[in-house]
């Protein structure tokens, strides 16, 4: 009988609890988004986010246990994302997980939220062939990760300023769309041909593997300021999103080629984009590289991906003690 475990993610503005049996059987995956709580401020307010996590974490755990038909005593491990993200938010999850592990006398497993994003692919596609190159394109991070085996990974490229998702959200905001802007930009980009706006493809000519997206955001702002009459939103956003997808696909495939990797995964909220998926299908097909991405609900933040990685760690004996700490940064 495979071990049942409970995973918690409170790294940013989503509270999520999942219950897994073994590495892949998701018995429950409950996520509460806080977008509505922060809407009036135009962005996530850290203090508000941690308070909200605190209010909803216990009811959410109860709901997940009920849906899974599992009781606390059935749990074999307790996992939590302890980095990176908003410190006050992570602390809520870490404190709850530690208390639970202590009370139940079960192993505690700390998980890196960024390392967990690609595990949404292991969750639904099974074992994937190493070495792998992962593009993690989330709201707060745009990272290229080279993974040679479970727990053996390193960041080989990152955004030096805004994450791609953050850039998409900010540009959507210029057009009056609330957070998260990605879904509406994606819908418009699918429905319209890109206008000839001449938007830049930042750092594409740079041979390195890093990204930069803040200049693209500024280019859209100046383009809008320079327009006299009515701006056609759909075609302009399609042109903007084309610049995003071009940069992400070209850099990812460049990294795969340079590292001799034959399989690529895409995860993080932006990977829910139909347009981005289509661009990756085309680019990977042309390059003869295998492509994996999770269903949209497992692209955005969720505790199921955290639970999947935690189950691998549990199997390998990689557990933590109660000194596990919350950490805001990915490295250092
Ligand atoms: O992974 P995620 O939920 O949060 C972080 O860990 O940061 O990613 C959120 C990002 C936001 O920028 C949001 O606009 C974008 O993912 N996003 C999408 C879609 N769903 C969420 N972008 C394009 N198409 C979508 N369907
Ligand atoms: Zn995330």
Image (cartoon, rainbow, N blue to C red):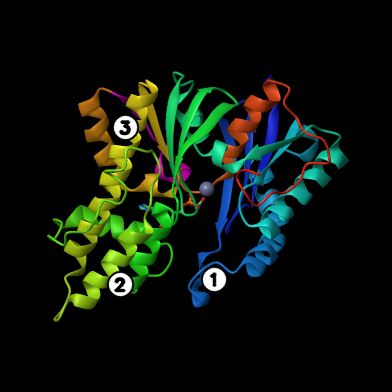
Identity of the residue drawn at 51% across and 30% down: 123
Q: Which residue is mark 2?
A: 175
Q: In which quadrant of the rendered image does the C terminus lie?
A: top right
State the mark number for residue 38. 1
- 291 in magenta: yes
> Where residue 228 sits in the image (x, y, percent)?
15, 81
What residue is drawn where x is 82% and y is 35%? 321
Q: Residues within 10 Å of mark 3 (few under 14, many from 20)?
A: some
Residue 216 lies in what quarter of the image? bottom left
Is residue 140 shown in magenta? no
Which badge, 2 or 3, comes first in the chain's sequence? 2
Residue closer to the observer: 197 or 276:
197
Q: Is residue 121 visible?
A: yes
Residue bounds of the magenta highlight: 289-298
Residue bearing mark 3 = 254
Instruction: Determine the secondary structure under disc 1.
Output: helix
């Amino acid at each position: 009988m495979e071990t049942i475990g409970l995973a918690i993610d409170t790294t940013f503005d989503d509270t999520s609890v999942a219950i897994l049996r073994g590495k892949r059987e998701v018995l429950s995956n409950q996520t509460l988004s806080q977008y509505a709580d922060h809407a009036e401020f135009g962005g996530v307010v850290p203090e508000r986010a941690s308070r909200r996590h605190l209010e909803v974490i216990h009811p959410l755990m109860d709901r997940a246990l009920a849906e899974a038909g599992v009781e606390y005593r059935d749990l074999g491990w307790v996992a939590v994302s302890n980095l990176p993200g908003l410190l006050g938010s992570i602390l809520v999850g870490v404190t709850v997980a530690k208390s639970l592990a202590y009370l139940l006398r079960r192993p505690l497993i700390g998980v890196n939220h960024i390392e967990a994003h690609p595990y949404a692919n292991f969750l639904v596609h099974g074992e994937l062939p190493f070495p792998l190159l992962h593009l993690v394109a989330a709201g707060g991070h745009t990272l290229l990760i080279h993974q040679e085996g479970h727990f053996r990974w390193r960041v080989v490229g990152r955004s030096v300023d805004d994450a791609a998702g953050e850039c998409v959200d900010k540009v959507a905001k210029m057009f009056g769309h609330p957070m998260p802007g990605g879904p509406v930009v994606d819908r418009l980009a699918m429905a319209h041909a890109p206008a000839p706006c001449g938007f830049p493809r930042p750092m594409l000519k740079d041979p390195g593997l890093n990204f930069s997206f803040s200049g693209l955001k500024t280019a859209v702002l100046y383009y809008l300021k320079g327009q006299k009459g009515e701006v056609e939103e759909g075609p302009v956003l399609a042109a903007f999103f084309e610049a995003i997808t071009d940069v992400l696909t070209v850099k990812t495939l460049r990294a795969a080629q340079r590292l001799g990797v034959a399989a690529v995964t895409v995860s993080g909220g932006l990977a829910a984009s139909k347009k981005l998926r289509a661009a990756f299908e085309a680019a990977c097909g042309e390059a003869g590289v295998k492509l994996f991405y999770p269903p949209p609900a497992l692209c955005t933040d969720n505790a199921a991906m955290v639970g999947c990685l935690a189950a691998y760690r549990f199997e390998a004996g990689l557990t933590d003690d109660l000194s596990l700490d919350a950490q805001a940064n990915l490295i250092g």
